[in-house]
Image (cartoon, grey):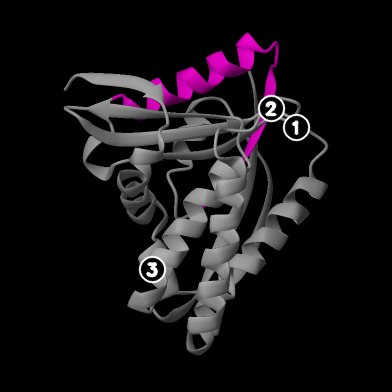
């Protein structure tokens, strides 16, 4: 498989949303079919809006992975305000049409609050962030994720940075970060619904250094 890496483009959105859906179980979380697209849209647009750098991996003309990062003080990604407005619109749509699924949608404000708390719990530097990282399921283990991750590290080095952090949870492939020497600095369990049933999600903050 021939893999190339390049900057993220607006035309990549649909392919990336599919990758995010399978990587982070968005469908299994939101439940109702009509809420899936707003949830996918919010997930991607919010991450792009908070990032200053984004690249994708492409194989045989198909996008198979994405990684985003943020260094405070660097310029936002192109279309920053468009991402912000799209996030607000999708959240409003989910709230208006998803009242009956409030128990499932409650995960998102709980997750946001957990991220704030995790950051307060660690004394490690939490300035530069790996804001999004996902690889298509059928390409995992083939080096795509490693290639994306190395480019994020190069992005930090190019700006003279060394320390970074990220948020993840136990539904994601967090073992990858541990294999790269990152440290689990803080954890918090939150209650949410998964496939319509009550469940517990362990949210985690990892820190690393180049």
Q: Judging from the image, what secondary structure is the residue with disc 1 in? A: loop
x and y percentages locating residue 177 in the rendered image: 51, 33
State the separation of the CA atoms marked 1 and 2: 7 Å
x and y percentages locating residue 52 in the rendered image: 61, 30
Rendered view: 56 above or below 170: above
**The quadrant where residue 113 appears:** bottom right
Numbered label tally = 3
Q: Is residue 133 left or right of residue 37?
A: right
Whether the residues at callouts 1 and 2 have beta carbons within 8 Å, the answer is yes
Q: Can residue 70 be seen from the camera position used here?
A: yes
Which residue bears the numbered disc 1?
127
x and y percentages locating residue 107 in the rendered image: 57, 70
Kindly identify the residue that appears in the image at 54 percent across and 14 percent down: 154
Decide which of 198, 50 is in the foreground and name it: 50
Numbered disc in front, either 1 or 3: 3
Q: Residue furthest bottom?
A: 100
| Tag of residue 71 | 2
Decide which of 172, 47 is in the foreground and name it: 47
Kindly identify the residue that appears in the image at 70 percent across and 16 percent down: 161
Q: Residues within 10 Å of mark 3 (few under 14, many from 20)?
A: some
């Amino acid at each position: 498989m021939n893999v190339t890496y390049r900057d993220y483009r607006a035309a990549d959105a649909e392919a990336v949303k599919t990758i995010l859906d399978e990587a982070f179980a968005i469908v299994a979380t939101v439940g109702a079919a009509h809420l899936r697209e707003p949830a996918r849209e919010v997930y991607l647009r919010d991450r792009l809006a908070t990032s200053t750098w984004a690249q994708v991996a492409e194989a045989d003309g198909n996008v198979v992975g994405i990684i985003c990062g943020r260094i405070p003080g660097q310029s936002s990604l192109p279309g920053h305000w468009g991402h912000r407005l799209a996030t607000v619109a999708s959240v409003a749509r989910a709230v208006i049409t998803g009242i009956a699924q409030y128990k499932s949608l409650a995960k998102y404000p709980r997750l946001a609050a957990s991220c704030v708390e995790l950051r307060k719990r660690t004394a490690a530097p939490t300035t530069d962030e790996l804001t999004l990282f996902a690889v298509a399921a059928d390409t995992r283990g083939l080096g795509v994720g490693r290639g994306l991750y190395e480019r994020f590290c190069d992005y930090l080095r190019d700006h003279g940075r060394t320390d970074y952090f990220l948020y993840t949870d136990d539904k994601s492939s967090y073992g990858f970060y541990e294999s790269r020497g990152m440290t689990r600095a803080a954890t918090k369990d939150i209650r949410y619904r998964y496939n319509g049933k009550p469940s517990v999600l362990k949210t985690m903050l990892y820190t690393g250094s180049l």
